[in-house]
Image (tube, rainbow, N blue to C red):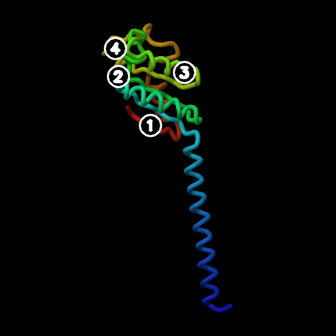
Amino acid sequence: MTSPTLRFRGLLLLLMAALLLACATVNAADEAADGAPLFINLITDDPHRAHMALHFGQKQLELGHPLTVFLNDRGVLIAAEQGAERFGLHQEIIGELVTAGAKVIVCPMCMKHYGVAEADLLDGVAVGNPKLTGGALFAPDTRTLTW
């Protein structure tokens, strides 16, 4: 074989290897995103923003992403039964999320600040602690969003 033919074959093999590597990288990224946990940090008591966050999380849970909703700052008011008049729709969604297997965690420091008692929390909602909250936040491949 001539030198140009060998170079062409070498270049062709190198190109094929690069293409295979690129496909494998894309597939690995797709696989990592499939089923990746979602951690929503919900800090607002604005009804529209809170509804967007809960609805988005609900749809991702339906798509197979394990979901944790962390209610902190004014978001803790959404999980308090005393907020049922203002947050009825939100509390209904939280109940559906918990039933579907999502974790809903409430910040204890924020509860204290806003006067929310543990006895006033919706059924299925957990009071956070470093192990529970950190376990969800730092789970492998977790994605986070804040509202």
Q: Which residue is mark 4?
A: 112
Packing grade of label 1 (10 A; few <14, some 14-19, many >=20) is some
Choose the circle earlier in sequence order: 2 or 1: 2
Choose the circle earlier in sequence order: 4 or 2: 2
Choose the circle earlier in sequence order: 4 or 1: 4
In the picture, the disc for residue 144 is: 1
Q: Which residue is mark 3?
A: 96
Who's the residue at 50% across and 21% down the image?
93
Who's the residue at 35% across and 22% down the image?
45
> Mark 4–mark 2 contact, CB under 8 Å?
no
Left/right of residue 53 with respect to residue 26 in the rendered view: left
Packing grade of label 3 (10 A; few <14, some 14-19, many >=20) is few
* Image spot of residue 104 (x, y percent): 48, 22
Distance CA(mark 2)–CA(mark 1): 19 Å
* Quadrant in the picture for the C terminus: top left
**Residue 38 versus residue 94 in the image, above or below:** below
Who's the residue at 56% across and 57% down the image?
25
Which amino acid, by three-letter code, is at mark 1? Thr
Question: Which is in the foreground here, disc 4 or disc 1?
Answer: 1
Q: Which residue is mark 2?
A: 45
Q: Nearer the viewer, residue 56 or 98?
A: 56
Indicate the secondary structure of the residue bearing disc 2.
loop
**Residue 130 versus residue 112 in the image, above or below:** below
Question: Which is in the foreground here, disc 2 or disc 1?
Answer: 2
